[in-house]
Image (cartoon, helix red, strand yellow):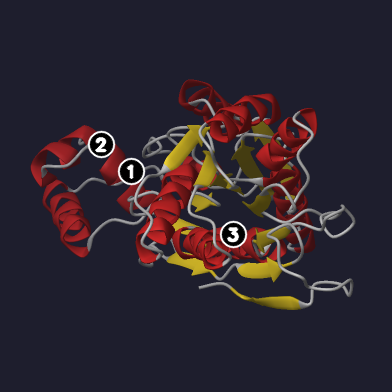
Amino acid sequence: MVTMSDVARLAGVSVTTVSHVVNGTRPASAATRQRVLAAIERTGYSPNTIARALARARTQSLGLAIGGLGNPYLSELIAAVEGAATAAGYTLLLGDTRDDPEHEARIVAALVERRVDGLLLAPSGPAPAEHSVPVVLLDRFLDVPLDQVGSENTEPTAELVVHLAALGHTRIGMVSGRRGLATTDERIAGYRLGLERSGLGEPLLEEGGSQRDVAREAAHRLLERGATGLVSGNNFMTIGILRALAERGLRVPEDIALVGFDDFEWADLLAPRLTVIAQPVAEIGARAVELLLSRLEDPAQPPRTERLAATFVHRDSCGCDTGHSPDPRVRPSG
């Protein structure tokens, strides 16, 4: 009896790859697909079509594995994904990865065991393991052949730095996010790019771990290093930075300028109102679901990577006199 292992051996690929080609659960290169099909023809392999049909029966459910559930941005993203999934007739199953690669692997495995039709993942580490269902990455990009969608990170962060430099700041510090996340790396790269474009040499970087209290301590260290302007790597950390400034009795923007990545629902209600980069959260969530459903319908199409434009929202915390009308200058970033 010819088995899938026999086909894999003849084609020079893994059994998993043969399974993906046979069942259409993950794209393969044209050359790999041709080798597998040729091996199937030579061996006469015939998969159990009934078992395959049962395995591919739709459950009308999607899985979402994401960390940082306390972060207002990610909570908004989850709501956007859930809304798009529901509108398409799917139930969303949510798992908290805690932004830990090992725990992420367990969460993903649990969602797959519950037979979700596809998986949306905000990766907390390097390339995710192969799975029997289609996977779409959202918010965080990786160099892998998977569908991915998120916002621009590097150029918008550079724009924040250049803006502070144009206001006369030469000691611009950044509180960066959790180490190892793609968004953290891209925003740090943008910070360095902004310094370079502004002719500023010394980077003032402190890790905020994407946590309020860690960011609070990082802000204190940057102030001790002489920073006069601060860039926050995400909105959860902005809260911690504001606490640090209050503890020192510093006024924004009179004593120190503050800008950040991610908008708040209430950012324009603070005094001063925060200058930020706003991500297209609803669009990211909706597009991620669209990509996944498209992948379910056509597993063989090439992987797609989509970076959506972020928006520079100019308010008061940078030190500019923008008046008191809501968001006097809102423009696409970059």
Other-residue count near label 2 (Cα within 10 Å), few / some / many at <14 / 14–19 / ≥20: some
Q: How far apart are marks 2 and 3 (CA)?
A: 29 Å
Q: How far apart are marks 3 and 1 (CA)?
A: 25 Å
Asked if residue 142 can be seen in this view, the reply is yes
Q: Position of residue 213 (x, y in %)?
A: 69, 25
Whether residues under marks 1 and 2 lie with C-beta atoms below 8 angstroms apart, the answer is yes
Residues at marks 1 and 2, CA–CA distance in whole angstroms: 6 Å
Question: Residue drawn 44% across and 45% down?
Answer: 182
Which residue is at the front of the view, 53 or 138? 138
Which of the two discs, 2 and 3, sits closer to the camera? 3
Tell me which numbered mark, 3 or 1, is placed earlier along the sequence. 1
Q: In which quarter of the image is residue 47?
A: top left
Q: Can residue 3 be seen in this view?
A: no
Would you say 287 lies left or right of 132 here? right
Residue annotated with mark 3: 288
With 208 as the anchor, is 20 left or right in this view? left
Residue 19, numbered circle: 1
Q: Is mark 2 on a helix, strand or loop?
A: helix
Q: In which quarter of the image is the N terminus?
A: top left
Is residue 47 shown above or below 113?
below
- The residue tagged 2 is 15
Q: Is residue 304 left or right of residue 308?
A: left
Quadrant of residue 312 in the image? bottom right
Identify which residue is drawn at 21% across, 64% down: 30
Q: Position of residue 276 (x, y in %)?
A: 67, 59
Tell me which amino acid carries mark 2: Val
